[in-house]
Image: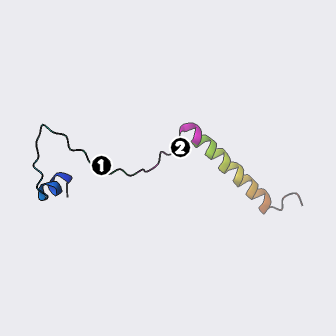
Amino acid sequence: MSALLRLGQCGFKHDPDTTLVVGHWTYLGTGYSPGGALLAAAVWHRRELTRQFAAEGGCG
């Protein structure tokens, strides 16, 4: 149901000369920047190499 329809049920009259401002925001995050994505991929790769090395017996 649209916001205008819900507001109409509350007695709100739509006026095309006004701007409806909805005061509810939800933060969803920003994701990685290109540099951050590259750094995250490098960390993941290094961790996988370390895990593989340990699984193969490591140094001992």
Visual colour scheme? rainbow
Badge 1 amino acid: Gly
Q: Going 53% across and 39% down the picture, which residue do you hit?
A: 33
Q: Secondary structure at mark 2?
A: loop
Q: Sort mark 1 into few (<14), some (14-19) or many (20+) by Cα contacts within 10 Å.
A: few
Q: Sort mark 2 into few (<14), some (14-19) or many (20+) by Cα contacts within 10 Å.
A: few
Q: Main secondary structure of the magenta part?
A: loop
Residue 11 covered by magenta stretch: no
- Find disc 1 in the rendering and name its residue: 23
- Find disc 2 in the rendering and name its residue: 32
N-terminal-most mark, 2 or 1: 1
- Which corner quadrant holds the C terminus? bottom right
Name the spot of residue 42 as percent of width and height, x first. Answer: 66, 44
Q: Quadrant of residue 36?
A: top right
Q: Quadrant of residue 39?
A: top right
Would residue 14 be found to the left or right of residue 54 on screen?
left
Would residue 44 be found to the left or right of residue 52 on screen?
left
